[in-house]
Amino acid sequence: MKEIKHFINGEYVGSASGKLFDNVNPANGQVIARIHEAGETEVDAAVKAARAALKGPWGKMTVAERTEILHRVADGITARFDEFLEAECLDTGKPKSLASHIDIPRGAANFKVFADLIKNVATEAFEMATPDGAGALNYGVRRPKGVIGVISPWNLPLLLMTWKVGPALACGNTVVVKPSEETPTTTALLGEVMNAAGVPAGVYNVVHGFGGNSAGAFLTAHPDVDAITFTGETGTGETIMRAAAKGVRQVSLELGGKNAGIVFADCDMDKAIEGTLRSAFANCGQVCLGTERVYVERPIFDEFVARLKAGAEALKIGEPNDPSANFGSLVSHKHREKVLSYYQKAKDEGATIVTGGGVPEMSAHLAGGAWVQPTIWTGLPDDSAVVTEEIFGPCCHIRPFDTEEEAIELANSLPYGLASAIWTENSSRAHRVAGQIEAGIVWVNSWFLRDLRTAFGGSKQSGIGREGGVHSLEFYTELKNICVKL
Ligand code: NAD
Ligand code: 6OD
């Protein structure tokens, strides 16, 4: 059986404790590998390696040298595209048709974009008058923050991990990554690419394991980690923030959401249906930016519901290797239990089940997989758990509205504030409504259209801080002011 080991100081190492756990293919329930679980010993070794590497060749490189290496990392991912694709799909159950367009290309792009960015960012300078008339000159310099702890989730494993490791390394930091216990393989494989690209030992380290009382907690509690960047559930974010308070370490938190789509009667219906289908069902609904609440203006409500139902029922459920499949399994049976518990709640609360609501029948070789049906409900009250809590599955509730003000109020009614999608052909309305939505990202007539130079993050309980473009530099560097008396 294949073993997935930690990557510490440029080498793959097993756990001293000998503790391993199963890596399961969620499409069929079969164990595909055994994963080493890091204890405090491995986490400490990884942090020590990362600290030492800051003082080694990595810390002495020019920006040009460092960014050239990061371009080689991106090219290394692309050169091994099929291996990354296979590994990502085996870990997650997602269709190759999706991961080949999103997960793996973005995994590579995250290194190139931030390598290019760091070469071209200016800092500030201020001339200052002084009483003696000679003056003073202030200027800013950016320095790496140090050792960054990166904790990543399972839904877009390579994409979300490199989204943090790319800028962290571009800024000259070193990292210790703890990928999700469900999806460790591409993070581990990246170690080989780092070595081949000439990234010095200790710059990129990986420890595997769980969250609480395991690798995640050991990493966030480690006193020699300078800052922690995390993507995952809001509750986990709170725990990590508490851990980071010890030693006053900075956090960047990209957390959960319960995102609203608002569909106005003046929308282009084809675009609204296509975009809402993707935002509700892509990646089996396991995208933090996904739409789980759809508000539709009353005159087009019935038509919209009927067309979304037809679109959901046309999705092709299948295993990753099926080229025609565009809808995979959930990431695990544990997650399926959570999603199905909401399917049950919707039933119990008297929802109209427009489509789905259960488990699809799969052929014998996939029967052990974590499959669920794409599901649409109507008719639930606004305070239903199904409408207010993040499910993170392929499902949405659709509710009619009558006025723009009502739609905005509904969209803003929850403590989350990650993303929203507005569908209208009236550009004044688009700007007016987008400006009033309490979310870090608002799309108009699109969804998950990403320009990596833009700010990304959540408001309210969906996160703290912004990453992307120059905003990543705010987290991954210390901006130091040097004041020179002339
Ligand atoms: P999770 O919070 O359960 O786990 C995320 C990571 O944190 C995993 O690596 C896990 O092992 C680790 N972890 C768990 N407990 C920990 C602890 N006490 N200390 C340290 N580490 C710990 O999230 P998940 O289930 O993997 O991912 C799904 C969630 O992530 C959803 O809520 C989704 O909305 C959110 N998400 C947010 C964004 C965003 O950009 N805002 C992106 C993707 C996913
Ligand atoms: O596109 C990105 O950079 C990003 N962080 C996407 C997050 C998706 C959440 O599931």
Image (spheres, rainbow, N blue to C red):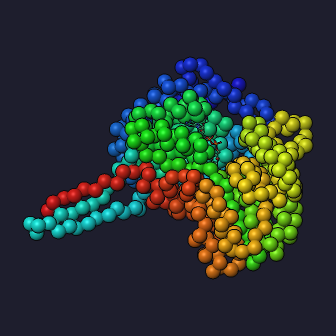
Q: Tell me which residue sits at (50%, 45%) in the image.
A: 229
As displayed, is residue 168 above or below residue 25?
below
Q: Where is residue 266 shown, x and y percent of the image? A: 75, 78
The residue shown at (28%, 56%) is: 481
Front residue of 96/36: it is: 36
Image quarter (top left, top right, bottom left or bottom right) of the N terminus: top right
Q: In the image, is 272 to the left or to the right of 203?
A: right
Q: Nearer the viewer, residue 64 or 220?
A: 220
Q: As rendered, which of 362 and 171 lies closer to the eye?
A: 362
In the picture shown, does residue 405 fall above or below 248?
below
Q: State whether residue 219 appears in this view.
A: yes
- When the figure is inspected, residue 47 is found, relative to residue 281, above or below; the finding is above
Q: Where the C terminus falls, by quadrant?
A: bottom left
Q: Can you name the residue that lies furthest to the left here?
A: 132
Residue 119 in percent (x, y) is at 41, 58
Residue at the (74%, 62%) spot, across then down: 294
Is residue 274 among the parts visible in the rendering?
Answer: no
Q: Position of residue 175 (x, y in %)?
A: 47, 40
Residue at 25% in and 56% down: 482
Q: Horizontally, is 199 left or right of 231 in the view? A: left
**What number of labels is visible?**
0
Tell me where residue 38 appears, x and y as whole percent: 55, 27
